[in-house]
Image: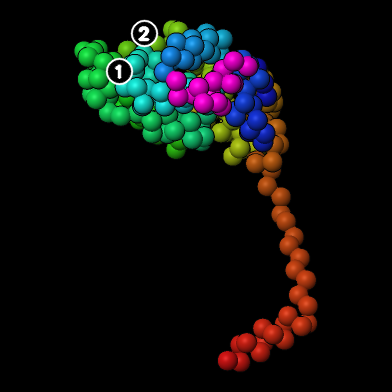
Amino acid sequence: MAVAVPKKNLSEWHSPSTRPEVIHELIHGVDRYNPTNLPFMEEYLLSQIKEGQYDIFANLAILKLYQFNPQHSNPDIIIHILIKALSSTVHGPDFNLSLGLLREPTAILHDIESDDEALSILMPYLTNLHELVRTCQFTKFWKEFNGESEAANILKTRYLPSHSTPIDDLRFQFSLSIASCFSTISLNQLSRWLDLSSSEVSGYVEKIGWDVEGDKAVVPKNGDNDVKAGVVKENVQLSQLTKLVAAAGY
């Protein structure tokens, strides 16, 4: 597992190295709007799910095709895209970008004449989970996620088993957010935010490249959690100052 510190280079987010060339050509060319390409794009999404990869722009291309061709909408694919967006970033725009391309679940189901209620149940649930993630309410997130609601049960039994490491992905994203705010944090607090037992948290901290010192986790300096005082020097010429004083006289 990579070291959990905020990334400064977004190239992998924009153009992941795992993206096949044929997919790259599809989503950046005129064929992006060709509905006959949907099976290839959906198959690529399923490979992302299986291999633990992520390509937000390819997934948005699928939703854009659904937007233009609502009769081809696949509720299961939509839910998987939202799950990938939820588990792949905390403060990024991915989830809201995906949601912005979707209509109300009832309208989607009406267009494809489906009576499967999973989409109607899960969309508001996933939206709520995203809001908890976005506002860093991690303890509340795990309470909702581990709950026994109908939506939670559908998510955990029908959809998450297809994803390679969804829980680890969520924990890693939460760790990135924590790393941007803390240089040290108590293991007790960290265990609540990452939904880990007291016996598991130390091992996880070392796994993501942080250090353990006593009852605290030490986060590597990453530019966000090591604030340094800056000295700003301004060079004001006398000619500029006299103009300012003269202007103030009016």
Residue 32 place in picture, x, y as percent = 49, 24
Between 194 and 44, the one lying in front of the other is 44
Give SS at disc 1.
Answer: helix
Residue located farthest toward the front when viewing the structure as drawn: 30
**Who is closer to the viewer here, 149 or 47?**
47
Mark 2 lies on a secondary structure that is helix
* Residue at position x 66%, y 20% in the image: 17
> Residue 249: which quarter of the image?
bottom right
What residue is drawn where x is 24% and y is 25%?
107
Frontmost of labels 2 and 1 is 1
At horizontal 70% and vertical 32% (from top left) the residue drawn is 220
- Amino acid at dot 2: Thr
Between the residue at mark 2 and the residue at mark 1, the CA separation in whole angstroms equals 27 Å
Q: Residue 207: x, y in percent? A: 65, 17
Instruction: Locate the N terminus and report the quarter of the image it occupies.
Output: top right
Horizontal and vertical percent position of residue 234: 75, 68
Q: Neighbour class for label 1 at 10 Å: few (<14), some, many (≥20)?
A: some
**Most frequent secondary structure within the magenta stretch:** helix
Q: Amino acid at mark 1?
A: Gln
Q: Which residue is mark 1?
A: 71
Residue 200 sits in which quadrant?
Answer: top right
Question: Is the C-beta separation of discs 2 and 1 under 8 Å?
Answer: no
- In the rendered view, would you say 43 is above or below 183? above
Task: Give the mark nearer the N terminus: 2 vs 1.
Answer: 1
Camera sees residue 152: no
Considering the image in quadrants, where does the C terminus appear? bottom right
Q: On the rendered structure, is 244 left or right of 155?
A: right
Could you say where residue 96 lies in the image, as x and y percent from the top left? 42, 34
Residue 30 on the magenta segment? yes
Range of magenta residues: 21-34
Identify the residue position indicated by label 2 in the image. 157
